[in-house]
Structures are given as C-alpha cells and as structure tokens.
Amino acid sequence: MPAYRDLKFALRILTKQPGFSLMVIGMLGLGIAGASAIFSLYNGLFLAPLPFPEAERLVDLDEVAPKWNLEFVGIAYEDFHVWRNQNQTFEGMAVWDDESFNLSGLERPERVEGARVTHDLLAVLRIRPALGRGFLAEEDRPGGAKVALIGYGLWQRIFGGKQDVLGQKLQLNSESYTVVGVLPLEAVLPARAELWIPLALSTEEFRGWYLNGVGRLKADASIGQARDDLTRIHRGMIETRQVNEITSPKLLPLRERYLGNLRLVTMVLLAAVAVVLLIACVNIAGLMLARGAVRTRELGIRAALGASRGRLVRQLLTESLVLSVAGGVLGVALGSAALKSLITIMPDQLPRWVRFSLDTRFLLFSIGVSVTAAVLFGLWPALEASRVDVRGALHDASARTSASAGEGGA
C-alpha cells in the first residue's frame, strides 16, 4: 500500500525533526484557529437554518418614515389590521408589543419579559404549543378573556414542568390571567419573551407606531410583490388616514432584519483571518523550501534508486498533509476556545435562535482549510525539492563516503 508507506515514512521523518514539526504545526494551528472561530460566528449568524418551518417565507414587517429620517418606526395597529385583511400575497401576518410583567401569586414574585401578541402569531410561525392550546380570535379583542401562554423555560423554572400548569392563575401587573398553554422551545420570536398574552387592541383609536410584525408569504409570492401589495393598500388608506402619508411598509427577510448589520463586520473578519492564514502558509512554504534544500542528497539517492519525480512529490505532500492535519486539530481546539470568548462580547440583542455550534458545516470547513493549507505551503516546495540532480547527489554521497573512509584510515 503506497499511501500507507508514504504516511509511515512521513511520520518517521517528522518525528526525527520535532523542532521543525512543532513550529509548523503551531504556526498553522494559530492561523486555522482564527479562521475556524470567525467562520463559526458567520455560520451561526447567516448559514444555520432558522428554527421555523419554511423560514425562507418569513419576512419582518415594519414601517419606514423618510420624512423623519427613520428607517424603522414600528407598525400602527390600524395599518396592520387593514394589511392583514386586504393583502393578496401573505398566508398570514401577526404583530406584537414587547412588555415586562410583574409576575406574582407564586412562591416568590419576579420580573418577567413578555409580549402582547395577536392570536395568529403561532400559526404564522407554524409552531404548536408544547402543552395546551394557543390563543383564540375572540380572546384577542378588547374585553376578551385574560389568558396567557408561558414559555418552556418559565414552565420548567417555576412550575417544574408539571402538566397541571394548565388552568393555573398568574398575577401579571396585579391582573389575573389563566394559563392555557405552554410555548415550545422553538418559540424564539418575540426574541426575549417568556410569556405571551393577547394584544387585544381595537382600530377605533390611533395609538401610533410601535408594534413589531412578521408575515408568512404565500408559496408563489416574492418579497418584492408583497412590498408592492402592502404599499398599494397603505396608500389607499391616505384619504381616511392622512398620517399614512408619513410612513410606508418596510419588508425584510427575517434574518436580514435582525442580523443584517453584522454581515459586513463578519465578512471583513473572515477576509482578515484568511489573509493571516495565507501569510502563515507563505512562511511555512519558506521553511519547507529550506528544509527541501537540506534534503537534496536524500532525495537524490532515492531518485537514483528508481523513485520517480511524481513519487517524490507525493511523499513530500504527504508530509505536508500530516503537518496540516496536526495543525488543523490544534487550530480547531484553539478556535473553539476563541469562539467561547467571542460569544461573551457579542451584542446582547442577538435573537435567541442564533446558535454557535461546531456542526457539519464547521467540520467540512475545517477539513477544507487544512487540505487547502497543505497544498498552499506544500506543493511548491515539493516540486522544487523533487528537481534533484541525481549525478550531483551521488557524487556528493561518494565524496562524503570517501572522506569518511580516509578519516578512518588516518
């Protein structure tokens, strides 16, 4: 098995030069560590799937006010009500208002982050309660029943995950609410809400722009068509609601709305670590060239014994690959530690669906970087070192042997 022999010989050669091997592995490990850590950030932010079925059809809903120089002003409930009833491009849409609640009536009171939501938010996100049911349409009206959905974490933390939580009474801001369901772990929107209650608003009074929204497009609708659709509806309301001259609907892919401001930063960081890794490979290539020059005699003798140039190149590339794999393992270990440090300084406003994990994409990236690095710093030195002068190498070996014999005879 030629490949096994190449690997065995490469390991023997590299272990005989521990200083050189450790230096190359260390340089490469540091370069791969930076690349793997930043790729993990990019992967978690922009490549990992969102925790919703057919998440590519979800769009963030908002309003923009160019006259006020505001890119996001929130949604007026009156606008949302008409959008939802008259649009032709959405399967459904929902809005919510973030709110904190004083939760009492239990063993100890606490402040809980929550949200007032329209009854159809679960349907738009296509998630089902882990226990119980969602809100009914009649509960999402002024004077409707005071009911609540509690988050999975809150259920575990306060109620111990007990099934009899349904029907329990909660005191929220001194008002009594009945628990009708438990949200699943996938209920990560609204981002920080551990508890939902119905929004229960009417359209009779204008309250301003403050709501957050999400919509699910129909299968055959694009975000551009949806934007035109809502703009048409919005402009048609100006005669009866002159404030609609101030704003226009603003639609963005869900990921772009919450994470788009981080895309340029992560791309710049990826480019920076790629340059650092390239510099490391160039430096290692220089070391490999110098090492190849020292091994001219050894390679010449092997060529004289019948080893082809391709055979020599393969052997030298195998040595580079061994070094690269070792550097890759070190780089992944260091990169994982660096990733944990980077996460601690990430913005607190990141959505809960963002997960930074060492998944299949990370594994493939690490393997690809290691193999590419082996080619970058190994191929040129291998080609240069394989251009051996067999006659010169044999003459040099003969001269060394004669000199040694002469010294012995003296």
Image (cartoon, rainbow, N blue to C red):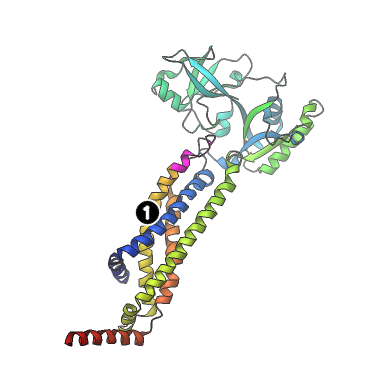
- Dividing the picture into quarters, in which one does residue 87 lie? top right
How far across and how far down the image is residue 196, in percent? 54, 23
- Dividing the picture into quarters, in which one does residue 378 lie? bottom left
Which residue corresponds to the image point at 53% horizontal and 54% vertical from the top-left? 272
> Is residue 68 in view from this perspective?
yes
Which residue corresponds to the image point at 53% horizontal and 11% vertical from the top-left? 174
Q: Determine the secondary structure under disc 1.
A: helix
Q: Are there few (<14), some (14-19), or many (20+) residues within 10 Å of tag 1?
A: some
Relative side of 105 to 69, left or right? left
How far across and how far down the image is residue 401, in percent? 24, 85
Q: Main secondary structure of the magenta part?
A: loop
Relative side of 396 to 149, left or right? left
Residue 92 versus residue 113: which sits nearer the camera?
A: 113
Q: Residue furthest left?
A: 409
User: Which residue position holds label 1?
Assistant: 330
Relative side of 53 to 306, left or right? right
Check residue 356 for magenta coloring.
Answer: yes
Q: Which residues are magenta?
A: 341-358
How far across and how far down the image is residue 200, in percent? 62, 19
Residue 7 versus residue 79: which sits nearer the camera?
A: 7
